[in-house]
Amino acid sequence: MLKLWLTPLWLLALGVTLGLAILALLFGLLWVLNRKAAEGVWAAVSESVLMPILWLGVGMVALFAFAYPQMPTDQVIESLWRLPSMGTQTVTQTIEPRSEDVEVPFAMIAEEVVAYRIESDQDLRVAAAPELAYSRPAAVVQGGEPYEWNTKSKLPRGLTGEVDAVYLTNDGDAPANVTLSFTSEARTPEVKQIPITALSVVGIVLAYLAVRLVAPRASTISAATAKEAISQPLFLLFAIGGAIALVCYIYIPYNTFGEDVKMLKDSGLSTIMVLSILFAVWTASVSVADEIEGKTALTLLSKPISRRDFILGKYLGILWSALLLFVILGVILMGCVSYKVVYDARETSNPTPDWQLCNAEMVSTAPGLVLAFLETGMLAAISVAISTRLPMLPNLLICGAVYVLGHLTPLIVQSGVGQNEFVKFFGRLLSVVLPMLDHLNIQAAIAGGNAVPFAYLGWVTLYALVYITVAMLVALLLFEDRDLA
């Protein structure tokens, strides 16, 4: 039972381990080429919020090493090694009339083939080895009628073991123009998440270092802001309270007739998002508004630091501390979702699920975490802009109103179509001024197990970045002429 729900976490830990190994390799190369630059990178990382994230990564490495003997290691490593060769391969060939056993190189493992399609304008026989075109053909293609096979087809696969080539026999009296298309997938398709996890770990660290290189002064302020934020009791309260709530969600009877896993995902994502937004807004008020009111900002700006560096640094510090909260609670949520699948099966006396089902449910929460983080970033930018002029309480009220209206804007716009002109105008105004947060709210789809396309994530990320940029420009304009004396 432990192995079932722990295997998905082990795959996640394997991805983190590979990511940290890549970072260690890059750091080692930098140390050899430029030791001074390597020392600067280490100093930048050690004094930032990346250090707690890396320690969490080390914990995942320990989980990977501890669970290694009990996991399907050989199966996973083989699929991971074969992953670059997966996908669709297409070959076009012309076969002379009445030709037998024309070899077409096509390296593959038959058991990895999930679908293939063969098109020919002449009658054609396809075999996996010479001299089998008539006795044991893999496929018989009628001229002008494509031959298709997939894992749902009732037809036999026709291929077995390792295949280096296929052999074509043209039964027609004219040359055959043949197109072969084979689609392969790893025997353990879950390994696709491993390189994505590794690249995410590497991307977070490189993004921090890139920002520090481009804006060193703002990065210095962001590091101090993030360290101050995570040292506050509120961060510890939200991290511990959120973790306890996520674990408790496992044992709450939702009375949903077998849909408790979906409810857990929806409740967990909402909990993480709300806690992160509250933490970001509170940190913006304390870090920006209180420093302005307490004249601390004036002292800081008396040094060679511009107002732009001050605002940008504060926002980045808030974002990095919110990211740490997301990483902590996100990993816990994934573990809870994986365990919930097994727990529900045991409680309802259903057949014991396999680890692949636990993994599918766990991985489906990742897009929701990304979108929730983007929403937190947008509201944090708004909060920073408000904090340049107003104290904590008005900031909380305004951000709360923006959160509610941002999710209700599509409904307001739809209610105004063909009805009251004022409602229509007000809805369109809100849709222009306020962020369309409902675009980032797809918990229902994620909880239902529906896949979130990468294209959708890309467009939503672009929208969030554009809105954050606009909000930060407004913050700079509001802070530019603010009297700090």
Image (spheres, rainbow, N blue to C red):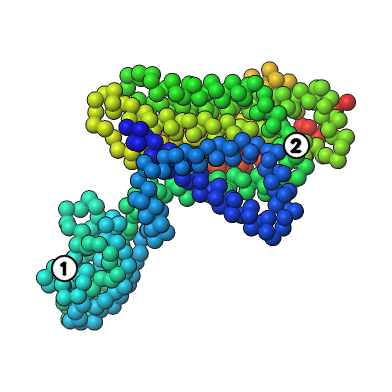
Q: Nearer the viewer, residue 379 or 435?
A: 379
Q: State the mark number for residue 221.
A: 2
Identity, as a three-letter code, of the amino acid under mark 1: Pro
Residue 137's tag is 1
Please state if 207 lies on the left or on the right of 59 as rendered.
right
Mark 1 burial class by Cα count in 10 Å: few <14, some 14-19, many 20+: some
Q: Visible in this render: residue 65?
A: yes
Q: Earlier in the sequence, mark 2 or mark 1?
A: 1
Residue at left 41%, top 40%?
67
Disc 2 crowd rating (10 Å Cα; few below 14, some 14-19, many 20+) is many
Q: Position of residue 281 (x, y in %)?
A: 65, 26
* Identity of the residue drawn at 53% across and 48% down: 19
Q: Nearer the viewer, residue 233 or 4?
A: 4
Is 173 located above or below residue 366 in the figure? below
Q: Amino acid at mark 2?
A: Ile
**Is disc 2 placed on a helix, strand or loop?**
helix
Q: Disc 2 to disc 1, how far (Cα)? A: 70 Å
Q: Quadrant of residue 44?
A: top right
Question: Is 105 above or below relative to 68?
Answer: below
Q: Is residue 152 left or right of residue 253?
A: left
